[in-house]
Image: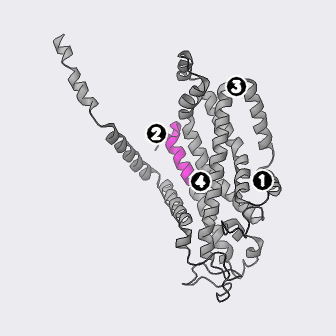
Amino acid sequence: MTQELATPPVAAEVLTVPTGAGAVSRGLTALRRWTRHQPLGLASLVIILIMTVAAVFAPVLAPHSPTKTDLNAPRLQAPTRSYPFGTDSLGRDVLSQVIYGARVSLIAGVAATVLGSLVGSVVGLVAGYRGGAFDLVVQQIMDGIMAIPALVLLLLIATILGPSMWHVIEALSLVIMPYAYRVIRSGALIARAQSYVEAARVVGASGPRIVFLHILPNVMALIIVIASITVGGAMLVEGALSFLGLGIPTDDPTWKTSWGAMLSPRNLGYMEQDPWLPIFPGGALMLAVLAFNLLGDSLRDILDPRLRGSV
């Protein structure tokens, strides 16, 4: 009996191990494993960080004004040391326009994805947990939104609301919302049948507590993957709307310009003689969309339990 009572000090020594250091160590180990097994994911993250820095510090990094017309500047100048990306038909620096255009694409893509994924995920969680008539009504509404072609719906909303950054974000979030809803609702339906949810009901936990404290953590990986993949698509659609003249106004003093506006038919008319006008903004948009898609695939490989063992 005395020997059994002498063992607790050993357990007490184990409890004195600092949990913060252990969490940091596990995080660094996971980061090293991710960089070793997911080099494309690391490269895409670096590209996104570079674009984010360029967007945030655009006034400092841009060598010239993206909108001011300089009568002394050469027009349709090929790339040179003074103008690395050349100039457009009005003598404006293309490099400065590309740097400022990153602001519009990143803000529109990220804001629309966050808003659409947040609303769709919350509605999907509640509908998947409650079921019944509420789930049926919400599902019919979401299916009705998805039945309309996304581009047609976006063009309709943009035409009614008018060209504006916030109108573009609202239109994109409405299109993103039903896709996030369907995926999260499926995850909530699976989690609702698990034993830990039944145990929470038995001890008297309320519905909101079960949804946000028990089910939400188990579908958070799905939300992260959906959001990371959706950002690239939202940026591409914003570029399409700006290309059609329904996105960011070209004379907006706040946002200056966007990659989609730089790909307008006016610049595409110079494609044969001055190919740098559409190539640089189009390449920047393509690189951004590719980086977010690769990052989403990398996060899926890490967060998906079925694929986690292979990483």
Instruction: For marks 1 and 4, give the CA distance.
Output: 22 Å
**Residue tagged 4:** 293
Q: Tag 1: residue type?
A: Leu
Residue 244, quarter of picture: bottom right
**Residue tagged 1:** 154
**Residue tagged 3:** 131
Badge 3 or badge 2: first in the primary sequence: 3
Badge 2 or badge 1: first in the primary sequence: 1
Q: Nearer the viewer, mark 3 or mark 2?
A: 3
Instruction: For marks 3 and 4, give the CA distance.
Output: 33 Å
Tags 3 and 2 touching, CB below 8 Å: no
Residue 309 shown in magenta: yes
Q: Position of residue 285 (x, y in %)?
A: 63, 64
Question: Callout 4: helix, strand or loop?
Answer: helix
Tags 3 and 4 touching, CB below 8 Å: no
Residue at 77 percent across and 31 percent down: it is: 137
Badge 1 or badge 4: first in the primary sequence: 1
Q: Tag 4: residue type?
A: Asn
Q: Residues within 10 Å of mark 4 (few under 14, many from 20)?
A: many
Q: Nearer the viewer, mark 2 or mark 1?
A: 1
Up-down: is 81 above or below 13?
Answer: below
Question: Callout 3: helix, strand or loop?
Answer: loop
Q: Main secondary structure of the magenta part?
A: helix
Which of the numbered marks, if any, corresponds to residue 309?
2
Q: Nearer the viewer, mark 3 or mark 4?
A: 3
Residue at 52 percent across and 44 percent down: it is: 301
- The answer to whether residue 27 is left or right of residue 86 is left
Up-down: is 7 above or below 34?
Answer: above
